[in-house]
Amino acid sequence: QVQLVESGGGLVQAGGSLRLSCTASGIIFSLNNMSWYRQAPGKQRELVARITTTLSTNYADSVKGRFTISRDNAKNTVYLQMNSLKPEDTAVYLCNAYWGSSRFEYWGQGTQVTVSS
């Protein structure tokens, strides 16, 4: 079965950095667009960053210049390097894999990121 397993979350002070990882199994990783979403309490889930199969990237305006998404197809892993973290970045961060349609869309269980002021 498909599994997306996130890691790297935690508690960090404002201005600090974290690196999230998401390792996939059960899919052909190189054929999937990979994304990071986040969901804060009482808020809608929002796209943070996406990296396509051709390594094109896009970011939410709120994280541009601070976050970097990357992927290693040999390791079936997507990363999110988060620098200059702010309290408003506090959320559960979820990994998403997408291959052409919602029928082939998968989610991880999420990893908590908490940024203290």
Image (cartoon, rainbow, N blue to C red):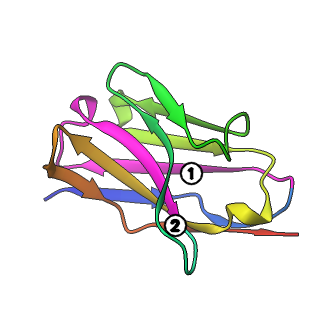
Query: In the image shown, does 94 or 41 lie closer to the viewer?
Result: 41
| Residue 22 included in the magenta stretch of the image | yes
The quadrant the N terminus occupies is bottom left
The residue at the point 67 percent across, 37 percent down is 64
Query: In the image shown, does 104 or 108 lie closer to the viewer?
Result: 104
Q: Which amino acid type corresponds to the residue marked 1 in the rendered image?
A: Leu
Horizontally, residue 78 falls left or right of residue 60, namely left
Horizontally, residue 56 falls left or right of residue 65, namely left
**Percent coordinates x, y for residue 67 in the rendering:** 66, 40
| Residue 80 included in the magenta stretch of the image | no
The residue at the point 56 percent across, 43 percent down is 80
Check whether the beta carbons of the residues at disc 1 and disc 2 lie within 8 A of each other: yes
Magenta extent: 15-38
Disc 2 secondary structure class:
strand
Against 59, residue 14 (above or below) is: below
**Percent coordinates x, y for residue 60 in the rendering:** 58, 43
Would you name the residue on which mark 1 appears? 20
Disc 1 secondary structure class:
strand
Q: Which mark is residue 111?
A: 2
